[in-house]
Structures are given as C-alpha cells and as structure tokens.
Image: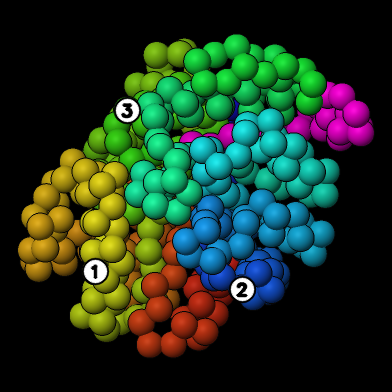
Amino acid sequence: MISQQDHPNALAQRSLRDRVGICIEGTDPVDSLNKIRAAELAGIQQVWMTAGGAGDGSPDTLTLFAAAAAQTERIRLGTAITMTYLRHPLLMAQQALMIHALAPGRLRLGIGPGARESLAGWYGLPMTAPLSYQKEYMQILRGSLWESNADFRGTFFQTSNAVQMGNFDAVITASQNAQIPLLTAALGSKAFQQAGEIADGALSWMCPVPYLLNQAKPALQAGAERRSRAVPPLIAHLMVAMSTDEAAALAAVRQRVQVYARVSGYARAFVRAGFARAVEGDEKTLDALARALVISGDESTVRQRIQELVEEGLDELMLQLVPVASEASERDQLLHLVGSLIC
C-alpha cells in the first residue's frame, strides 16, 4: 500500500515547496538539531539525514530525529537511509513508532543495505542477497507498522507478535493507523523495480538525472505495474552549489564523485549510467558526471532548475549542499530558496 501523503494522485496537487527537501549533514548532534530547527523556521517542509555509521562519527539518525521531533512542530523527518543490516526490523519498527508518537505523521522511514564496503569494514558483517533481505525486512516493517502484525516466517527472519507485548503495547495501540511511509534505497534497475513493488517511495543517491529519468523511473513504474499498485514517488538526491563559479562548483562535486567511485555499488551505477570512464579517472567524463549530479548557479538559476527537474518527471528532490566558498552563507541561501518556493 502507499500512504495517502505519497499517493501519485495527490502528488500533482502538492506544492513545489512540499516536494523539495534538504539534507542535514554533520557529526555534531547539537549542530544537526540546530540545522533542523533553522530549516523549519525557513519554511522547509522536509529534511533528510543519512544513516551515519561507526566509521564516520555521525549521530544515529533515528535517535537524533526523536530529539528533533520534540523540538520542532511540523517539518517532516526522513531517513535516507537507515541501514537494514544493523537493526532487526522489529527494533526499527519500535524506534519509528516512538518518533511517530512524538511527531505524528512526520516520519518517513527510508531503509537500505548501505555500502558493502562500509558494512564489512566498519562492522565486519557480510552483505548477503541484499534485495531478498530488503524485501523480507520491508514485509516485517509493513506488518508491524501498518497492520500491528509482526508474525513472519522467511529465509532471513522468523518473527512473532511478541512486539505487541509489554509496555510497548500502548505505543502500538496509539499508532495502529500511523501508516508511516516506508521508502527503500535504490541504485540499480532491480532495486528501483523492487521499490515499485513494495515501497512507498524510492530513494536515489548520487544518481545522474538522465539515468533517473530514462532508466530508474521506468523500472519503478514496471515494478508497480507488476503488482498492480500505484507508482510510488521517485525521490532524487541531487547536490546543490550556490555559486556562479562553475569551475569551483564542479571541482567540489567531482571530489565527492571520486570518493563514491571507489565504492563498488556506486561504481557500477556510474557505469550503467554511461560514465564508465569517470570510474577510471578520466577528467572530461568526471566533469560530465558532476554536471549530471549538481544544480549550480545563483538563486534564480537554481530555482529555475528545481522547477524544471520536477516538470521533467522527478517526483521529489532531496538537495545536498556542496559548499564552494562559504558554507554558512551558502546554506542560508539554500534554506531561503527552498523555503520560499511556491506553496
């Protein structure tokens, strides 16, 4: 099922501002909370945070969102993503329900396996059959969050309705109609197809715009058609450089691209998207890939490009600031821009 908020029939009725969110980054939880509060004050409708992990010192997103839920009033809080291999799905459901109890209707739970290298390097855990694992994980989340039924028997998980026992029963009872939107991370066509089959939205990360429009979205639609369900929204991650210095903006984006190109999953995604030579370090192709991943320019140019991308078929945008000259002032510019989009 797809939540009312994310039903495609309602998508066109949502304002542009409601369809654009920003990424919150940082290792300092107090600073992250301040950024979330500042985003709400600026009129931002949605913030997103990545999983973080033991290797980069980032705060646990769901824990931080519980604090943010108590310190804000309306802004939606989205995980993009929380790593499935690190939490049992019933624990994930429990944390999600607690945030929902503090901020009803404001959590959007994005899940995914994360990078194979991070899982093995930081935690010493193998990644086995990630799509099959994610499908079972989603089934348990859907059952426990949407149906108050955690009874499941599969290849990776065997769970029971013990989640409804004890003090947690009151939270379950209060949240039976929560229908917290469940989103899945996607890089390849199979993952986008699976999102179309089982999720309330597909979350991209570091995917070039042409790839999203020409390969990812058709796969998402095919998955939805296969299950005779409405097509869930594609939430596209893009970087934003609030700068007219194109060379400096591209250099900042290219630096990030080169980091991701060393991660096997993203390297394969760049090849599928037609940027194989970027993975090999070709300067010209790296610049072309960077251009396909970033919106840059002055406020008017960035605003216009946001409008164009939504009109071209990207259902929502998840914008990540790439600082060029002054991170603080450029963040303020981005907050003002997104907060002032047409209601």
Q: Which residue matches tag 1?
A: 254
Q: Earlier in the sequence, mark 1 or mark 3?
A: 3
Q: Estimate the x, y position of residue 223 in percent, counting from the top left.
A: 39, 21
Q: What element carries label 2?
A: loop
Q: Is residue 116 left or right of residue 230?
A: left
Q: Which residue matches tag 2?
A: 28
* 3D distance between C-alphas at marks 1 and 3: 27 Å
Q: What element carries label 1?
A: helix
Q: Which residue matches tag 3?
A: 190
Q: Estimate the x, y position of residue 296 in percent, counting from the top left.
A: 33, 71
Residue 124 visible (yes or no): yes
* 3D distance between C-alphas at marks 2 and 3: 35 Å
Residue type marked 2: Asp
Q: Earlier in the sequence, mark 2 or mark 1?
A: 2
Colouring method of the image: rainbow
- Vertical relation: 230 (above or below) 299: above
Q: In which quarter of the image is the N terminus?
A: top right
Label 1 Cα neighbours within 10 Å, binned few <14 / some 14-19 / many ≥20: many
Residue drawn at point x = 68 percent, y = 46 percent: 107
Q: Which residue is more in the foreground, 225 or 171?
A: 171
Q: Which of marks 2 and 3 is nearer the N terminus?
A: 2
Residue drawn at point x = 10 percent, y = 57 percent: 280
Q: Which residue is more in the foreground, 144 or 77?
A: 144
Residue drawn at point x = 54 percent, y = 80 percent: 332
* 3D distance between C-alphas at marks 2 and 1: 25 Å
Q: Estimate the x, y position of residue 281 in percent, counting from the top left.
A: 11, 63
Q: Estimate the x, y position of residue 253 in percent, counting from the top left.
A: 29, 69
The magenta region covers 164-184
